[in-house]
Image (cartoon, coloured by chain):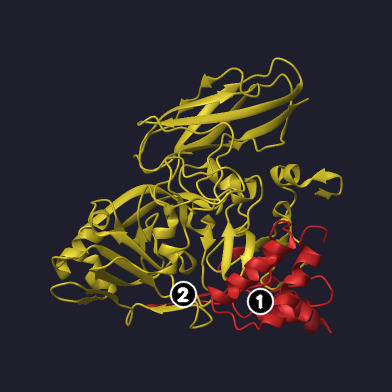
Chain colours: A red, B yellow
């Protein structure tokens, strides 16, 4: 029992010191530098089209690219999704592009 | 738009309380600019999270109370999601090729054999302050933290190019880093400079930030530094330099990072420009850093307002401060001048004569007379922001 508690304290101390140092996820090994990016998960508002939006948008970027935007009308979001397909080559069918633009403008656009 | 009875605009300006987020965590489904979380990325202190992948992190304003921005506090901005997360200097090379006499491949040690140059320069994202545009604009909703003042150390781009021998007929130099898009169909992040610009003395390939190696997230092992120009040209984890005989067709030059072709770089709000040109030099800016907007100050106590001012490669000649919403303007005292690319600190001692809310405004002018507009100039991409900021200080 005592050992378990001690172990827990030790683990939490190590964890805290890693956070405080700001160098967690950074390794210097001779001439090599490596980092591990934090695994941050962005949740979207529940609603029709959320899964499709999440699946396709995450191919290229985290979903906070959606959630941090200001409120725009549907036409703007349609143009943005079209840009993702035409300019950046996102493999999104016309049908799914419509679902995504509908979802984002409903839940994150004007009125959402 | 209302949010808990506070208008979005005021909410952004007040800069709400931020919460620290551990190395892993769930980000809620709505994030107003004011509610940015503080996150810790490798080699970085707690920064304000804009997006997690590709990472875009901004510097909390408190770090700008110092003349030099610490490496761990400098903002992070990548365009493509496959950013370099591992570099071995043993195998890393910087390649110079294209219309040159002799293509070369330089190791980190080879690069360091060129003459070392060092100076302090402001690095600022072209879209810094985009969230303050009215009407609002699509794109990264930066507050004012996508900037910093860093002492860069490296070698002249010119010296490196000349060692490869620039052949006649060359017109541009194209820069590419180690970052890659998730999809092969996405345009790679290529930026270019006209040859005459690329040969300017002050453009360097930097391998040091404030005397230390670059953090991975700021472009380890080397990045381009184009002082006076927006950071879009400061290609991170630079690995490939190509001298070309024709103008770049890169999406990031031809379509993105462009401003209206007008001396002000602006158009009527909400309209499209007839013609655009690539964004280049930074506009003149001044910011109040301390006390922060919305601060409460105790009446009867003298305080000193302070902030920073900079412009695209010209020294700041004057900073004027108004504490009455722009009616009366008085000169601030300027701090030490460490060069035309650095920002300069300004200080303004102030003792309010009575309690109340004071609107503080600051305006800088550089040595060629460039200053800041009272009302914001607008462009469709949300670049060049330099309108005179209005901050409320409450004296009680």
Q: Residue B53: tell me if it is visible.
A: no
The residue positioned 30% from the left and 77% from the top of the image is: B93
* Residue A10 against residue B130 in the figure, above or below: below
Q: Say which quarter of the image contains residue A18.
A: bottom right
* Residue B386 against residue A106 in the figure, above or below: above
Q: Using a 10 Å C-alpha cutoff, classify the residue at mark 2 as few (fewer than 14 neighbours), some (14 to 19) or many (20 or more).
A: some
Q: Using a 10 Å C-alpha cutoff, classify the residue at mark 1 as few (fewer than 14 neighbours), some (14 to 19) or many (20 or more).
A: some
- Quadrant where the N terminus of chain A sits is bottom right
The residue positioned 27% from the left and 71% from the top of the image is: B242
Check residue B274 in the rendering and tell me which mark sits there, or answer none. none
Say which residue label 2 marks: B187
* Residue B157 against residue B290 in the figure, above or below: below
Say which residue label 1 marks: A57
Instruction: Give the Cα separation between the discs numbered 1 and 2.
Output: 17 Å
Q: Say whether marks 1 and 2 touch (CB < 8 Å).
A: no
Nearest the viewer among B61 and B298 is: B61
């Amino acid at each position: 029992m005592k050992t378990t508690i001690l172990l827990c304290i030790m683990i939490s101390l190590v964890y805290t010191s890693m956070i405080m140092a700001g160098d967690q996820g950074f390794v210097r090994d001779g001439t090599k530098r490596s980092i591990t990016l934090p695994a941050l998960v962005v949740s979207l508002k529940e609603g029709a089209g959320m899964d499709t939006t999440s699946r396709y948008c995450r191919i290229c970027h985290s979903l906070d690219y959606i959630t941090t935007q200001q409120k725009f009308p549907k036409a703007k979001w349609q143009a943005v999704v079209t840009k993702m397909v035409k300019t950046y080559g996102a493999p999104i069918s016309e049908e799914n592009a419509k679902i995504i633009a509908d979802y984002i403008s409903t839940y994150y656009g004007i009125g959402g | 738009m209302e949010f808990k009875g506070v208008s979005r605009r005021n909410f952004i300006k007040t800069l709400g309380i931020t919460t620290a987020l551990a190395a892993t965590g769930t980000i809620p489904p709505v994030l107003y600019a004011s509610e940015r979380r503080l996150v810790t990325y490798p080699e970085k202190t707690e920064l304000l999270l804009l997006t997690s992948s590709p990472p875009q992190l901004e510097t909390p304003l408190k770090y700008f109370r110092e003349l030099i921005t610490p490496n761990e506090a400098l903002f992070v901005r990548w365009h493509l999601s496959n950013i370099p997360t591992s570099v071995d200097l043993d195998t890393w090379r910087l390649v110079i090729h294209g219309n040159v006499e002799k293509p070369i491949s330089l190791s980190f040690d080879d690069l360091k054999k060129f003459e070392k140059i060092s100076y302090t320069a402001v690095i600022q994202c072209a879209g810094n302050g985009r969230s303050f545009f009215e009407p609002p604009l699509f794109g990264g909703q930066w507050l004012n933290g996508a900037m910093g003042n860093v002492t860069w150390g490296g070698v002249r781009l010119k010296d490196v190019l000349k060692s490869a021998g620039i052949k006649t007929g060359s017109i541009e130099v194209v820069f590419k880093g180690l970052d890659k898009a998730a999809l092969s169909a996405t345009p790679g992040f290529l930026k270019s400079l006209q040859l005459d610009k690329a040969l300017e003395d002050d453009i360097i390939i930097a391998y040091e930030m404030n005397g230390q190696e670059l953090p991975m997230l700021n472009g380890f092992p080397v990045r381009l530094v184009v002082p006076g120009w927006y950071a879009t040209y400061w290609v991170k984890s630079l690995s490939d330099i190509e001298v070309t005989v024709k103008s770049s067709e890169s999406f990031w030059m031809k379509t993105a990072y462009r401003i209206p072709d007008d001396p002000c770089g602006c158009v009527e709000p909400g309209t499209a420009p007839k013609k655009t040109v690539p964004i280049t030099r930074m506009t003149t800016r001044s910011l109040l850093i301390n006390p922060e907007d919305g601060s409460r100050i105790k009446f009867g106590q003298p305080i000193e307002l302070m902030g920073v001012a900079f412009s695209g490669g010209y020294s700041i000649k004057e900073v004027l401060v108004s504490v009455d919403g722009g009616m009366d303007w008085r000169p601030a005292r300027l701090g030490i001048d460490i060069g035309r690319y650095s920002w300069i600190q300004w200080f303004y001692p102030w003792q309010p004569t009575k309690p109340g809310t004071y609107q503080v405004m600051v305006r800088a002018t550089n040595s060629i007379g460039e200053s800041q507009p009272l009302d914001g100039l607008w462009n469709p991409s949300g670049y060049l922001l330099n309108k005179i900021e209005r901050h409320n200080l409450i004296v009680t």
